[in-house]
Amino acid sequence: MPSCEPRGDDDLVVPPWKIKVVELIALLDPRERRRALVEAGYNTFLLRSEDVFVDLLTDSGTSALSQEQRAAMELGDEAYAGSRSFFRLERAMREVYGYRHLVPTHQGRGAEHLLSKVLVRPGQLVPSNLYFTTSREHAELAGGRWVDVAVPEAQDTTSTHPFKGNVDLAALENVLRAAAPERVAFVRVETCVNMAGGQPVSVANLAAVRELTRAHGVPLILDATRLSENAVFVKDREPAGESATLPGVIAEIAALADGAVFSSKKDHFVPIGGFLALNDDELAERVRELVVVYEGFPHYGGMAGHDLEALAQGIRESTDEALVRHYLSQSAYLGGLLLERGIPIVVPVGAHAVFLDAKRFLPHVPQTSFPAQALAAALYLAGGIRSMERGIVSGQHGDEPYDGLELVRLTIPRRVYTEEHLRYVADVVTEVFERRELVSGLRMTYEPTHLRFFQARFEPEGGEPFAGSLEPALASEPASS
Ligand code: PLI
């Protein structure tokens, strides 16, 4: 039962917002869903949004704007240079995160690109708590080599470690010791590690990473994309966080790093935008030299003036504890429903999504047959739910063998869906779970060179049975005309 304050881990918090504008959605009939899925090559990225009922592909750029953000957008100063909107954004960033320099970019990967261009030289290492797809790609395009230094629990979907986003300090120290300082480009620590299930990093761990990087003279850069949620986990799970305010913990985490990359499409509730924040004057100058080549003038960096305004307001809203707690309670609630029904998910439930463990969900599908991709396709077929593969398709690196996490992400957009939607999602996942033996694997028919998960295409390994076999589950729905 929902409450204003969460009483247990899985309790929904009553939303601290009400809905003013709605977007209608509709569930296609089963035959139409099958047609849409086949046209999309069994890749949920390639579905049209109008063919989706509940869209849990991503929390990126899919939040509802607040009335304050919309009002602020009216003030957008579209001057090419010296825009008032830039200075309002800079003020908001400094107030909340405390960094000296702000370089806006069109979204997070724009900031990753600039960061890699200025910090990574060929052959240098980038140690990180796991990886994010675009973060690793940019470091490697600049000639760097990604090194995973996450704690082993990050890869264990059943471990209840409260901070599975932590860095393995011994592993990091080994990397730093073995390499001369100039061989390490920077250490990257992601808050609420996306690919591990949205798992937080503790302040104690981050402080220890700070010490190590300082001792070895290597910059420490956060991927602070989901910093607000991480800060709430710190408040709830770390003794030092208990008496602190949410803005206090956010500022404390930010202060432990030399700079941060933000995809503002998540915590900052904007459809587009991101930035690189830095303390070092000279580094910031070098980034500004590049931003004009790749993004735009340093006072807009690929965003419109009204985007800068929505982002400035969004940064402030991301420190509102009631908003962040409600958001976290939605993931916890959905995860709780699935756990009650014996469905294998990543525990503890993380920040922005519930992650189904496809290896345990579909034990009969070998990883080489893309079980998470197949499961994401089955969820769409069964109930029009769009989710995202976060397994071998996203994670496999070149020709290296991959036996890592094989997850399907049910990602919750901020301020968008209600308890009824979440219950519907849980029911559809349950239905597929009950008929899981009918889901067969896929084979890849088209593989793009870069970030293949976005546009790869698949077909069922066994011809048609995959699509056909789930249809009995849909017998209660009206037949298509
Ligand atoms: O999608 P961008 O370019 O604004 O941001 C890239 C990016 C960087 N870091 C992290 C941790 C991300 O999660 C991230 C983007 N994530 C997406 C698109 C997602 O669906 O999770």
Image (cartoon, rainbow, N blue to C red):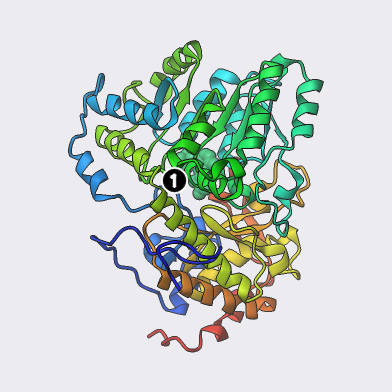
Which quadrant is the C terminus positioned in?
Answer: bottom left
Q: Amino acid at mark 1?
A: Lys
Left or right of residue 442, residue 34 in this image: left
Residue 312 x %, y %: 32, 35
Nearer the observer, 462 or 234: 234
All told, the count of numbered labels is 1
Report helix, strand or loop for mark 1.
Answer: loop
Q: Is residue 52 visible?
A: no
Left or right of residue 398, residue 469 in this image: left
Q: Residue at x 70, y 24 (%)?
A: 212
Per the image, the residue denoted by label 1 is 266
- Name which quarter of the figure residue 457 lies in: bottom right
Nearer the observer, 383 or 282: 282
Q: Is residue 22 visible?
A: yes
Left or right of residue 58, residue 323 in this image: left
Residue 167 x %, y %: 69, 37
Looking at the image, the residue that sits furthest to the front is: 243
Residue 139 x %, y %: 61, 29
Q: Residue at x 73, y 56 (%)?
A: 159
Looking at the image, the residue that sits furthest to the top is: 282
Residue 164 x %, y %: 67, 47
Q: Residue at x 33, y 21 (%)?
A: 297
Asked whether mark 1 and ligand 1 are closer than 8 Å, the reply comes as yes
